[in-house]
Image (spheres, grey):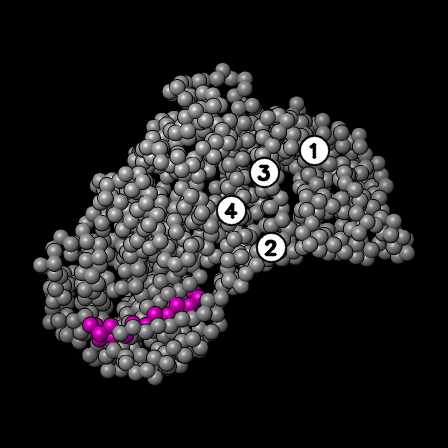
């Protein structure tokens, strides 16, 4: 049982036994004691008691209850009660499972087995969450031999009460001499950890990390403990210091990291009142407050999560270092070592780079950079040897102002980012070992910094390094199919290192307050000049930092079908060189913010903006793209597409005369041809026409609605689309001279994919048609269907209006929390206020929707009536509240 001084406030055995004697049924006494004990431990936690002591107390407390219960029900010597897993380690947190194994003799009496069954039932009845197994010694050996998880559970076993000889027999039967020798166990556990890291390294786990299973979580610490126990026969982590696997400082870091994770997990259990290992958004605020981080805004959460992320980075580094130590001890110790000299400072040992002696970094501080460059230049190097990682960490103090101003170190850093291979990988390694933050204090300031939203899934430092890795990979054949434009541009760029520097600094000023892009300019210029880049190169990097959001904002907020928008954008980017660099940085930034953001729609939007701007730049200002020219070209190309469809040109031209010329500016040729063919084939004009194009030149699927104009068409169609599980990313609304509406919606499935097959296409078509036919001027709003995560955010609806006199329209921007039903509700409000929708740009940033609507009044003119503005504002806010 747990070796700890009893706590009578937590559990007074004498009092407990008296209460048992006074009652006929023991269940109420056990229930009451368990509840009081958990309440006491919770209050201890809230008052700031040491988490190690709380964990030990809880293990001791559960021991007392189990042993007393066991003696109440089990009198036979055929059985032994054993704690396994986390309970075996005496590492119980408030709502942890109680893992038990009951050892039985081979020929245990059947009547005695009923005693065990009654005991287990009683545990559940009084409130313990028990996981259990009943095995003989032979079964333990057999099961453990075939399942490393069972082996690990048994390895952590602890005798609670019962037949002690039976327990010792089981221990011998499952020892390394019998099954799972150390090397085999270590190799299997390495594979297991790799699979777990891959599973929990996805976007959701980064937004809402699993305290136990995610990289840097409790499992990574337990992994070290398991291997140590198997190799050194049941030692604790502290003993690794004696074996020179850890220094005292490293053990202290590992211990403090483990204690932080214990505290977070304990706080999660208090918050949820059950076992919960995920730091979900809805728990992050209450957990942060229990940990002492409280604020009215999100600052408290962000500070808490920054501490959390910095701590798990240290655990990941120690896990890497210690497992490499074990690899050398377990796998390489009996092999003949392969040592290859590199230069007078470094050599390779068993494919890992190391210093030739422990004083290298003190004598040659520039070697702190050189080691990463050497890794890049020799791709057979698997990594840095554990002893050298420790020396790097111990010599970080050498990276001071003198180091930063040393021409050798400045040259080495630039050389690292000029390498053709592994730039992102080695910068990430420099970050993990603390070198990057030591060299760049501005980078150190954003380490572990997160933003409490659903849009940015990485911490700022992780995002920056992911962006740089994306920039490097765009030039590889592996990425050619997914990013063809980026692949082609990257291979032509004269200086990729300028792109990497822009990636390094584009978000470096986040968290300082103010415009991070503008604040980052100064940092970028200072760094570039310090590293003796030319004036042109320094200004290009600074410009990229300042403008890194320009392409996204233009594509998402402006009408890129308008030649005037393209001309204005081309003037801002100046020339093809600036455009090329900015395009690559933008795509890398989007993919590095959240890989799930990139889809065919975004790809097409950015590609169209790039190609149209390039065309504008090549023509020059003396030959601007004229609207009449664009309209003429669109008509000719559309006619050519329809030519083989057995349709009279006269009928086509007559139909085209019913729409304004702007229609041909706002639609691509394939859309015009598709609309025209559909409308001319549609004979019953009293019924709506609904068409679906699964794949279009806009990068999304298209839904086209053609019908007699009336109120609520947009609201009805978008409600049906939303109910189908589709996301609207763009909408173009046209009303022709015969009072028919031509509405085109660009849509994607909720996972960002296109509509894939005819069955889905027919489902979409029939559902929208049914809604349009059954709904006249009235429609109910329906209930909100909110995602779980959205409940953690309180985003007030904000509405602004801007006059677009050149196009004779009003631009309305609505910022609100993103939920299914937003578009249809806004559509109803617009109809109620007599505002006609001309175009819509739909953008979602995690939990936030920022939608732009281009409006006109009933006379097809810009809205200028203050009462109409007030009507729109109040109606939309009411609809979305």
Q: Residue furthest front?
A: 402
Element on which disc 1 rests: helix
Q: Secondary structure at mark 2?
A: loop
Q: Do residues under tags 4 and 2 come within 8 Å of each other at their CB atoms? A: no
Which of 824 and 451 lies nearest the eye of the viewer?
A: 451
Classed neighbour count for the residue bearing mark 3: other residues with Cα under 10 Å, few (<14), some (14–19), many (≥20): many
Q: CA distance from mark 3 to mark 4?
A: 14 Å
Asked if residue 649 is positioned above or below residue 865 in the image, the reply reads above
**From which residue to which does the magenta span run?**
804-819
Q: x%, y% of residue 776?
A: 37, 81
Disc 4 from disc 2: Cα separation: 16 Å
Q: Which mark is residue 453?
A: none
691 sits left or right of 795 in the view: left
Q: Main secondary structure of the magenta part?
A: strand
In this rendering, would 241 be left or right of 777?
Answer: right
Percent position of residue 159, x then y: 76, 36
Side of 481 relative to 342 (left or right):
left
Q: Is residue 98 magenta?
A: no
Q: Which residue is mark 1?
A: 139
x and y, in percent, of residue 117 in the image: 77, 46
Q: Quadrant of residue 870?
A: bottom left
Alpha carbons under labels 1 and 3: distance apart: 36 Å
Return the residue at label 4: 309
Quarter where residue 255 is shown: top right
Do the residues under discs 3 and 4 have CB atoms within 8 angstroms?
A: no
Residue behind mark 2: 292
- Report crowding for label 2: few under 14, some 14 to 19, many 20 or more residues within 10 A (C-alpha): few
Closer to the observer: label 2 or label 3?
A: 2
Q: N-terminal of the two: label 2 or label 3?
A: 3
Q: Tell me what residue is drawn at x 30 percent, y 53 percent.
A: 546
- Identify the residue under disc 3: 254
């Amino acid at each position: 049982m747990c070796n700890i001084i009893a706590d009578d406030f937590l559990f007074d055995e004498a009092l407990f036994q008296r209460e048992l004697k006074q009652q006929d049924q023991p269940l109420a006494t056990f229930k009451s004691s368990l509840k009081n004990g958990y309440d006491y431990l919770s209050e201890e936690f809230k008052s700031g008691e040491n988490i190690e002591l709380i964990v030990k107390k809880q293990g001791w407390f559960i021991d007392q209850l189990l042993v007393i219960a066991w003696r109440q029900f089990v009198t036979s010597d055929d059985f032994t009660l054993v704690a396994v897993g986390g309970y075996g380690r005496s590492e119980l947190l408030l709502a942890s499972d109680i893992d038990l194994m009951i050892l039985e003799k081979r020929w245990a009496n059947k009547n005695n087995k009923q005693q065990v069954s009654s005991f287990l039932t009683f545990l559940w009845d009084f409130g313990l969450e028990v996981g259990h197994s009943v095995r003989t010694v032979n079964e333990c050996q057999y099961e453990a031999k075939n399942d490393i998880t069972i082996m690990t559970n048994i390895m952590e076993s602890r005798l609670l009460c019962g037949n002690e000889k039976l327990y010792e027999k089981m221990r011998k039967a499952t020892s390394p001499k019998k099954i799972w020798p150390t090397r085999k166990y270590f190799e299997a556990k390495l594979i297991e950890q790799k699979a777990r890291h891959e599973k929990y390294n996805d976007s959701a786990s980064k937004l809402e990390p699993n305290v136990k299973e995610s990289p840097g979580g409790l499992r990574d610490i337990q992994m070290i403990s398991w291997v140590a126990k198997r190799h050194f026969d049941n030692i604790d982590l502290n003993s690794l210091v004696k074996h020179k696997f850890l220094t005292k400082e490293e053990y202290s870091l590992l211990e403090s990291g483990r204690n932080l994770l214990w505290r977070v997990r304990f706080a999660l259990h208090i918050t949820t009142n059950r076992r919960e290992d995920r730091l979900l958004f809805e728990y992050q605020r209450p957990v942060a407050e229990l940990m002492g981080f409280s604020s009215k805004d999100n600052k408290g959460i962000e500070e808490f999560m920054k501490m959390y992320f910095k701590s798990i980075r240290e655990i990941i580094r120690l896990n890497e270092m210690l497992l490499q130590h074990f690899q050398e001890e377990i796998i390489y110790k009996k092999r003949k070592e392969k040592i290859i000299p590199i230069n007078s400072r470094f050599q390779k040992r068993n494919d890992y780079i190391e210093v030739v002696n422990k004083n290298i970094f003190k004598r040659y501080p520039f070697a702190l950079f050189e080691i990463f460059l050497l890794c890049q230049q020799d791709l057979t190097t698997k990594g840095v040897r554990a002893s050298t990682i420790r020396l790097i960490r111990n010599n970080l103090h050498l990276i001071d102002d003198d180091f930063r101003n040393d021409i050798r170190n400045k040259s080495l850093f630039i050389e690292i980012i000029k390498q053709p291979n592994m730039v992102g990988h080695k910068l990430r390694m420099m970050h993990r070992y603390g070198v990057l933050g030591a060299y760049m204090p501005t980078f150190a300031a954003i380490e572990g910094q997160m933003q409490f939203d659903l849009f940015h899934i990485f911490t700022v430092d992780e995002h920056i390094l992911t962006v740089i890795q994306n920039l490097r990979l765009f030039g590889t054949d592996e990425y050619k199919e997914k990013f063809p434009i980026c692949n082609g541009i990257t291979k032509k760029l004269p200086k990729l290192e300028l792109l990497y520097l822009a990636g390094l600094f584009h978000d470096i000023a986040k968290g300082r307050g103010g415009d991070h892009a503008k604040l980052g300019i100064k940092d970028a210029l200072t760094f570039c000049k310090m590293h003796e880049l030319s004036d042109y190169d320094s200004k290009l990097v600074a410009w990229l930092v300042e403008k890194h959001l320009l392409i996204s904002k233009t594509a998402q907020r402006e009408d890129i079908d308008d030649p005037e928008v393209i001309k204005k954008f081309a003037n801002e980017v100046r020339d093809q060189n600036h455009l090329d660099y900015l395009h690559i940085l933008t795509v890398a930034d989007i993919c590095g913010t959240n890989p799930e953001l990139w889809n065919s729609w975004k790809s097409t939007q950015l590609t169209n903006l790039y190609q149209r701007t390039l065309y504008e730049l090549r023509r020059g200002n003396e030959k601007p793209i004229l609207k009449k020219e664009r309209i003429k070209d669109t008509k000719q190309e559309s006619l050519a597409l329809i030519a083989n469809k057995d349709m009279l040109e006269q009928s086509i031209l007559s139909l085209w005369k019913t729409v304004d010329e702007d229609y041909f500016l706002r639609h691509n040729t394939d859309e015009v041809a598709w609309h025209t063919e559909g409308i001319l084939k549609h004979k019953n004009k009293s019924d709506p026409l609904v068409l679906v194009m699964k794949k279009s030149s806009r990068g999304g699927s298209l839904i086209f609605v053609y019908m007699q104009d009336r109120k609520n068409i947009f609201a009805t169609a978008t409600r049906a689309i939303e109910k189908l599980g589709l996301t609207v990313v763009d909408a173009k609304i046209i009303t022709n001279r015969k009072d028919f509406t031509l509405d085109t919606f660009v849509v994607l499935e909720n996972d960002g994919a296109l509509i894939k097959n005819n069955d889905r296409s027919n489902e979409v078509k029939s559902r929208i048609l049914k809604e349009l036919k059954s709904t006249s001027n009235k429609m109910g709003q329906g209930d909100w269907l909110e995602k779980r995560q959205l409940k953690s955010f309180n985003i007030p609806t904000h509405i602004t209006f801007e006059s677009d006199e050149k196009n004779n329209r009003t631009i309305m921007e609505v910022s609100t929390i993103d939920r299914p039903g937003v578009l249809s509700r806004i559509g109803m409000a617009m109809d109620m206020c007599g505002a006609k929708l001309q175009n819509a740009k739909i953008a979602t940033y995690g939990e936030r929707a920022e939608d732009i609507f281009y409006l006109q009044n009933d006379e097809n003119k810009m809205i200028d009536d203050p009462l109409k503005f007030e009507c729109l504002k109040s109606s939309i806010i009411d609809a979305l509240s």
